Amino acid sequence: MSTKNYNSFPEAPEVLLQPGEQFRLVRRRQTLDQILQNETGPEGL
């Protein structure tokens, strides 16, 4: 079992710390729509 999106929990954003203590966002937090794209209901079983 993959822990990615376990219990529909969104992936955390990723931040890169660059030299000089500059932060750069490299991946945004998932939106609810993105999480629900892979969900199926009883008709999908």
Image: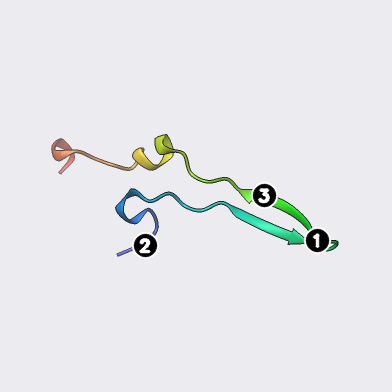
**Helix, strand or loop status at disc 2:** loop
First in residue order: circle 2 vs circle 3: 2
- Specify the color scheme: rainbow
What residue is disc 2 on? 3
**Label 3 – label 1 distance at C-alpha:** 13 Å
Please report the residue visible at 29 percent of the width from the left and 65 percent of the height from the top.
Answer: 1
Please report the residue visible at 40 percent of the width from the left and 57 percent of the height from the top.
Answer: 4
Left or right: residue 27 versus residue 2 is: right
What residue is disc 1 on? 21
Bin the neighbour count of mark 3 within 10 Å (Cα to Cα): few under 14, some 14-19, many 20 and up. Answer: few
Q: Nearer the viewer, residue 40 or 32?
A: 32
Relative to 29, is 18 above or below?
A: below
**Label 2 – label 1 distance at C-alpha:** 31 Å
Q: Position of residue 12 (x, y in %)?
A: 51, 53
Please report the residue visible at 65 percent of the width from the left and 55 percent of the height from the top.
Answer: 15
Relative to 42, is 24 above or below?
A: below
Query: In the drawing, what numbered circle is on residue 25?
Result: 3
